[in-house]
Image (cartoon, rainbow, N blue to C red):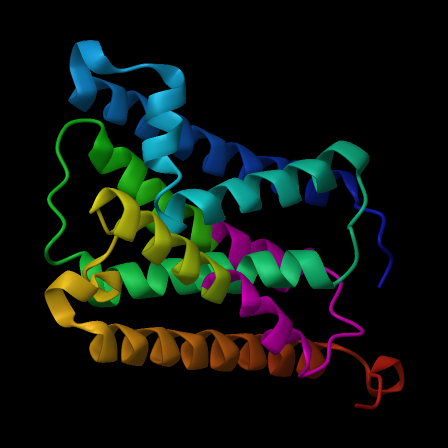
Amino acid sequence: MSLTLTRPHRIAAACVALAALTSLGIQFIAEGQQLGEAATAPRVLWLMARYFTILTNTAVALIFGITAFYARWTGPGWPAAATVWIVATGGVYHALLAATNVSIGIEVWSNVGMHTVVPVLTALLWLIAAPKAPLTYLHPVIWTLYPLLYAIYALIRGLIDGRFPYFFLDPTRLGWPMVATFILGLGVFFVLSGSALVLIARLLTPANRQPSD
């Protein structure tokens, strides 16, 4: 598959990046409204940077924004990694967090954008247009380093300021053994999700273009 984007695919990549940026922008405004007079741009950005959802939507915006700007895929690895990260983000949110998350005002729209719209658009674009060879089953292991490093970052930050972004990363609430279990489980989930994407890529790639492991 050519790494050069057709015009429709370039527009689609730009739409994915724009959807992520718009959702992030709405969340920025919502966070600022909640802080009131204490809100400053650096403070709002620092608070937002606590969350995996925010960081992952930022990664999607960058990866697909660069792709659209240059009208060329960065290779099969980055768009595939972004797809796994953002789809898993939406899946974890809807499975573990949506039922207890109470959004108000414009934050409702940012939640829908970051957890539903962007994952769906990213997955569709990857399926339809992204290069899929040569992806191997080593890639999911590499892609999982990002969520694992995030977990370490979130724990260190939470231990310093006493605020943990998600209940399953809160050792003061669950205890360290349970947090470790959640991290291990999520790591396995990311590896399996990535492996499923690699399998789909191989099914969609002609046999003579598939590398041997």
Q: Nearer the viewer, residue 205 or 137?
A: 137
Left or right of residue 63: residue 167: left
Residue at the outermost top position: 37
Q: Residue at x 35, y 80 (%)?
A: 185
Q: Is residue 57 magenta?
A: no
Residue at the outermost bottom position: 213
Query: In which quadrant is the C terminus drawn?
Result: bottom right
Left or right of residue 211: residue 143: left
Report whether residue 116 is seen: no
Residue 135 placement: quadrant: bottom right
Residue 153 on image: x %, y %? 42, 54
Residue 96 on image: x %, y %? 21, 66
Residue 63 placement: quadrant: top right
Q: Residue at x 21, y 46 (%)?
A: 163
Report whether residue 163 is seen: yes
Query: In which quadrant is the N terminus drawn?
Result: bottom right
Q: Residue at x 44, y 54 (%)?
A: 119
Task: Say how many tags the image has.
Answer: 0
Left or right of residue 128: residue 97: left
Residue 140 placement: quadrant: bottom right
Q: Main secondary structure of the magenta part?
A: helix
Give, as a single range, the part of the protein colored magenta: 121-147
Q: Nearer the viewer, residue 208 or 179?
A: 179
Q: Residue at x 36, y 54 (%)?
A: 156
Residue at the outermost front position: 160
Residue 161 on image: x %, y %? 25, 42
